[in-house]
Amino acid sequence: GENVEQHPSTLSVQEGDSAVIKCTYSDSASNYFPWYKQELGKGPQLIIDIRSNVGEKKDQRIAVTLNKTAKHFSLHITETQPEDSAVYFCAAWQTSGTYKYIFGTGTRLKVLA
Amino acid sequence: DADVTQTPRNRITKTGKRIMLECSQTKGHDRMYWYRQDPGLGLRLIYYSFDVKDINKGEISDGYSVSRQAQAKFSLSLESAIPNQTALYFCATSGLGQGGETQYFGPGTRLLVL
C-alpha cells in the first residue's frame, strides 16, 4: 500500500520569508495530492491540491510542485505571515486496492513576527 | 452551519467504559471516514464507509466499531475504552470519484480515557 513521508516535522521562519514542506510517496499509481492546513482547535482544511498530470499549481502565496519520477511533492508558501502558523498535512490518494487517502505525519509551521 | 459536525467536542471517560462519537454531515456526500490524530503520527484511518451498506476497516480499527445509520450519519464506538485511545478524533466526508476528492473534516472530538 501507499506510504507517505513528510519533512520537516517542525519549521520556524521569519515573517516574510518562504517555507517549504516536502512529502514523498511510495505508490506510483497515486494520482492526487492534496495539502491540508490545521489551525488550533479545528479540523484540517484543504488549501491546495495537485493531480498527477500537472507539475505545478499556484494559488496566490501558495504553490505545490509534483515530481512524479522522484515521487515527491512539495508545498511552498511565500511571504509568510503570522496567520500561516499552523500544522500542515500532505496526503496521497491511494488507487491500488481500495481508494483512500494516506496522510503524512504533519509539519508544525511557526511564523515569527 | 458547519457542513460536518461532531458530538461531543470533548469527552472524559474511564477505562472499560463504552462510548460513542457521532458525526453528521450536510454535504450530501456518500463517503465518510473516521480518523485518529496523535502527536507526531498525523492522521490515521480507523474506518471508512463509501455508502450506507459499505463499511471498511482502516489501518487501526482494533478496539473500534462503526455504524452508518444513514447517508448523513456515521458513528464511532469504543466498546471498552483504554488509556491509549486518548486522542483527537476526526470525522470527514468526501464525494465520489476515482481521481481523488476533497475531504471535509469536522472540528474534532478530544477524548481522554483515564
Image (spheres, rainbow, N blue to C red):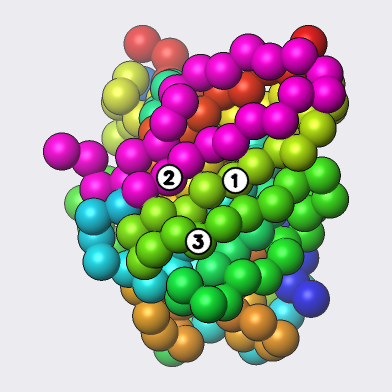
Residue B27 place in picture, x, y as percent: 24, 60
Picture quarter with the C terminus of chain B = top right
Residue, disc 1: B76
**Do the numbered discs 1 and 2 sit on residues whose CB atoms are within 8 Å?**
yes
Which chain is mark 2 on? Answer: B
Identify the residue shown where x is 83% and y is 24%. Answer: B16
Where residue A8 sits: x, y (%)?
67, 39
Q: Is residue A62 visible?
A: no
Type of amino acid at the residue the image marks with label 2: Cys
Compare residues A23 and A2 and report the one nearer the observer. Answer: A2
Q: Is B7 colored magenta in this rendering? A: yes
> Which of pointers 3 and 2 lies earlier in the amino acid sequence?
2
Say which residue label 2 marks.
B23
Which segment is the magenta one?
A: B1-24
- Does the residue at mark 3 contact the one at mark 2 (Cβ under 8 Å)? no
A25 relative to A23, above or below: below
Q: Which mark is residue B68?
A: 3
Locate residue A85 relative to residue A71 in the image: left or right.
Answer: left
